[in-house]
Image: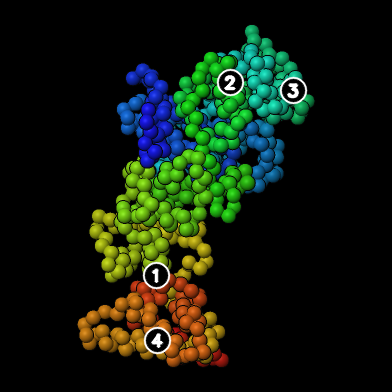
Amino acid sequence: MTTNKYQHWGDRIVDQILEKPLPDNHIYRIATGITPSGRIHIGNLREVVTADVIYRLLKEKGKQAELIYLADDYDPLRKVYPFLDPKKYQDFVGRPVSEIPCPCDQHSNYAEHFLEPFFASMKKLKIELKILHCSELYKSGQYNEVITQALDARDEIAAILSEYTGKEIDEFWSPFVPICESCGIMTQIKVIEWNRQDKSVSYTCRHCNNSGTMPIKGNGKLTWRIDWPARWSFLDIDIEPMGKDHGSKGGSYDTGKEIVRRVFQKNPPFPIIYEWIRLEGMGDMSSSKGNVIAIEDALKVAPPDILRYLIIKATPKQRINFDPVKQLLAVFDEVDNEKAKRRDPRAIELSRSGDFIPIGIPFDHLINIVQIAAGDPKKVKSILQRGGYHIPDSAYEELKNRCTFALNWLDHFAPQDIRFSIAENMPQSVKSLSEGQRKVLGKLSSILKNMMLNTSLQGTDISAEEIHQSFYEAAKEETGLSVKEIFQAFYTALIDKTSGPRAGWFSKTIGVDFVQKRLYQASQVNIQGTLENAK
């Protein structure tokens, strides 16, 4: 088959998958999942969005498909993570995360504390998941047959692991680890014997010195490198995205392929190996380190279509360096503006969640206007319309949503130099301006006053460029100052900062009359006195 290199990566992968002929009624099962040990973040989102792309494209081609999400809630808590109370959780290390208390006491267990907001986010992202909890699969006995197969093939599996990893396998190593019935811990267990007739294992616990015999049903789990191919087997998984660590040479996919073929007599799923998402300036995201942006938090600053597009535009093997400042603003505009240079129309199609309405307003522009309007959507609309943007009534709700995203972005991610508010009264910092700076503000005020008078007589309007040029005109009369110092004085008087939005546009947006009066008042402030007369 000839593959078009300009196809979207999802189309190319699905073409590869469909090269293998299967019956028309075959249901393609795509699997994804995670251990909910901490907040589920946008790094984890890459896997589930990648799976969703394949799911959507298979459906687009008329195939039956299921997107299965396996919540690995029967995995043990590995340690007391930095975000946990050591006094509360030290004794729970080594127990399955489905069997320990919720950190906020509002959920049925620790795992659900992190899964609930994740599944809520999936609904917003329009990702249709068939959710399976591994704790329930083990407790219901659905794993029993593969556990039996794995224990019977213990030596063969040990040989595969040794061959691929180069590690020596301990004589007491077991593919299945029971949970100690005394202390509830599963990470310090030594399996002594497998009784196939009774479907039970005998063990000793190094943690509490307990010994016992436990039925395999619901009383333990397969270790990861065996659990993964086991679920491929009994769930008939056809396709699975995986991080580069699992897909690397000698990784768990390599061992899983051998185990699923030789022990479970099934074929491994089609692998889609993806790179991790790095948080700009902080490295790879990690729930255990707390170095994350949780998906529910990301959805507060960007609509679902934007987050989906961020991932879907890049090929799975491309690293995504997530920058919530520059990159997020750029991606916002690629999705919103049909004429954006780097826009990927196919990625846009696959990113749709059904709610996003393009309104053609650059997000960085909206961020400035939202601050000028103090977050009021009606004022934002009015300012935009004065600036030449047409906002129909049908788009007003989307504009309101966009204002909320902008405000949340300002709260969560905006650098200090981007944040501002119009000072209601003269800022105290005006007193720190030099005499030359205050004089030039007076000159600027006079220039603006003359401009307003002339345009009023002529029935015209002052342009942002004319206002901007007035700074250079004022600078000619105060030769001891740089233009930079004049701009600093201007922003100090208006927003109590030394920088801000482009001065000409900013003045027109907040009102030239207001700016002219404020600059005059600032020019009158006595550095030795008070600001009372300048309000």
Furthest residue in direction right, as rendered: 209
Of the image marks 4 and 2, the number of the one nearer the N terminus: 2
Do tag 4 and tag 1 residues touch (Cβ < 8 Å)?
no
Q: Residue at x 33, y 80 (%)?
A: 466
Q: Which mark is residue 372?
A: 1
Of the image marks 2 and 3, the number of the one nearer the N terminus: 3
Of the image marks 4 and 1, the number of the one nearer the N terminus: 1
Gap in Å between the C-alphas at discs 4 and 1? 26 Å
Gap in Å between the C-alphas at discs 2 and 1? 62 Å
Q: Determine whether, in the image, residue 394 is placed left or right of residue 442.
A: left
Q: Determine whether, in the image, residue 244 is placed left or right of residue 385.
A: right
Q: Determine whether, in the image, residue 433 is placed left or right of residue 220.
A: left
Please tell me in which quadrant of the rendered image residue 257 appears: top right
Q: Residue at x 52, y 66 (%)?
A: 416
Q: Quadrant of the C terminus?
A: bottom left
Q: Which mark is residue 170?
A: 3
Q: Which one is closest to the eye, mark 2 or mark 1?
A: 2
Badge 1 element: helix
Of the image marks 4 and 3, the number of the one nearer the N terminus: 3
Residue 382 visible somewhere in the drawing? no
Q: Nearer the viewer, residue 426 or 104?
A: 426
Q: Nearer the viewer, residue 99 or 488?
A: 488
